[in-house]
Amino acid sequence: MTSAREEFARQEAELDELYREIILDHYRSPRNQGSLPAPSVRREGLNPLCGDEIQIDLSIQDDVIQDVCFQGRGCSISQSSASMMTEAIKGLSLDKAEALFATFKEMMQGSDQVDPASLGDLEALTGVRKFPVRVKCATLAWHTLDEAIREYLKTRA
Ligand code: ZN
């Protein structure tokens, strides 16, 4: 897998400098890293293409995400995306978090209908669109979040 790793490192070096700085900042100083003592729901996600792993803990009250933590390992894009996501969704209702996931997904699929400025640091991940295989790295945390919310709603019902 050395060649794939070298290829990924090359791709990361090709990102726009500003984007790369934001991504590396989140990678080196992850926000909301760790686990919650008593999460409402915990979910793990895996991106086999790159070997990225993510665990998301959510604390939910009255359908609002009161707290969120993540831990994992993998490439800088997967881990920084998770860090950015925790910042973006904390305090949001489950509906709003799902809507943000939809917006983010559209943006990563190349939609021009999304105003990237509305996504804060997440905009930095638009640089990854040049490398379609890495989009899965950027969306791993979000798919894991989506599964966590669905699981929460199902078990609660
Ligand atoms: Zn990755």
Image: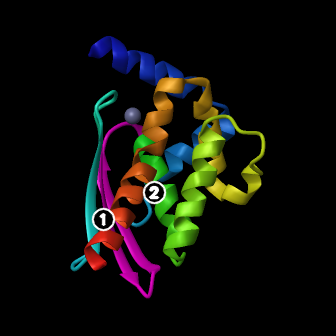
Q: Amino acid at mark 2?
A: Ser
Q: Identify the residue at image location x=49%, y=72%.
A: 94
Q: Nearer the viewer, residue 71 or 146?
A: 146
Question: Where 26 falls versus 86 (above or below)?
Answer: above
Q: Amino acid at mark 1?
A: Glu
Question: Label 2 to label 1, Cα distance in Å?
Answer: 21 Å
- Side of 9 relative to 38 (left or right): right
Residue under pointer 1:
151
Identify which residue, 106 or 26, lies in the foreground. 106
Q: Which residue is mark 2?
A: 83
* Dominant secondary structure, magenta: strand
- At horizontal 35% and vertical 78% (from top left) the residue drawn is 59
Disc 2 element: helix
Q: Is residue 105 left or right of residue 28?
A: right
In the image, residue 16 lies at what x, y percent? 67, 32
Ligand 1's quadrant: top left
The span picked out in magenta is 53-76
The percent coordinates of residue 123 (x first, y second) are 66, 48
